Image (tube, rainbow, N blue to C red):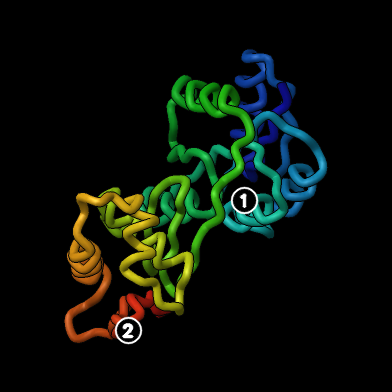
Amino acid sequence: MRGLVVEDDIKLARSLRRGLALDGYNVTTAATGDEGLALASTTAYDAILLDVMLPGVDGFALCQTLRASEVWTPVLMLTARTAVSDRIRGLDGGADDYVVKPFDFDELRARLRVLVRRGPTRHAQLLQVGTMSLDPAARLATRKGHQIELTEREFDVLEALAQHAGRPVSREALLAEVWNEDPDVSPNVVDVYIGYLRKKLERPKGPRLIRTVRGKGFVLEPL
């Protein structure tokens, strides 16, 4: 198996290379984001261990660039950052998993085994609407770096609106897409869930993020 470690801490990079060699990895190391991006873009690896704070291109940007280039090698991010917003940013950018330093090496090995068994996974395209980002694969919604706690159905409604951001989506279209035109579901349920979303997304006296267009449906505004 081939692995790429992108880490500017030379001592840690060497330690990872030695440890992963015991699991059968042939590990290549890179000390800068630019070097890591060049290697990951041109060489097939089974997994990439990617530090966030790197000289040149940082880990977030490196991962986003790979995904935008249709490189789906599993990425395990390594970082000393512990903020939830940073973990969300990494996952939103296309990382498959996230380990905070200092980490237990056995746990890292276990997480890496899971990613390698799963293999390259094409990530559903992120939906960006203004300051809000939706990750359909991870079913995560964030706004200005903060996660929005949504139920499964709320996420489905928001995703449907985000796919047509700036344009009205009718109640009938939402019923068909989210509730599969279930005859036992009243059209009023759409208004109920729009109300739930407004409470979670909009600030009191702030701008209306989900706008009602009479006779046409609802519009998600890119604010």
User: Mark number for residue 143?
Assistant: none
Amino acid type at mark 2: Val
CA separation in Å, label 2 and label 1 = 39 Å
Q: Which residue is mark 1?
A: 63
**Residue 196 visible to an observer of this rendering:** no
Rendering quarter of residue 44? top right
Density class for disc 1 (Cα within 10 Å; few <14, some 14-19, many ≥20) is many
Q: Is residue 149 depicted above or below 36 in this figure? A: below
Return the residue nearer the eye: 4 or 182: 182
Label 1: state its secondary structure.
helix
Give the residue displayed 40% in from the left and 67% down from the top: 161
Residue 197 locus on image (x, y percent)? 25, 66
Name the mark nearer the viewer: 2 or 1: 2
Q: Which residue is mark 2?
A: 213
Q: Is residue 2 depicted above or below 73 in this figure? A: above
Amino acid type at mark 1: Cys
Give the residue displayed 60% in from the left and 20% down from the top: 19
Density class for disc 2 (Cα within 10 Å; few <14, some 14-19, many ≥20) is few
Give the residue displayed 54% in from the left and 45% down from the top: 95
Return the residue nearer the eye: 183 or 42: 183
Residue 46 locus on image (x, y percent)? 68, 29
Question: Given the current orientation, which residue lies at the most extreme right position?
Answer: 42
Q: Is residue 154 depicted above or below 217 in this figure? A: above
Q: Is residue 185 depicted above or below 77 in this figure? A: below
Mark closer to the chain start, 2 or 1: 1
Tell me: 172 left or right of 70.
Answer: left
Return the residue nearer the eye: 104 or 116: 116
Label 2: state its secondary structure.
strand
Question: Given the current orientation, which residue lies at the most extreme front position?
Answer: 183
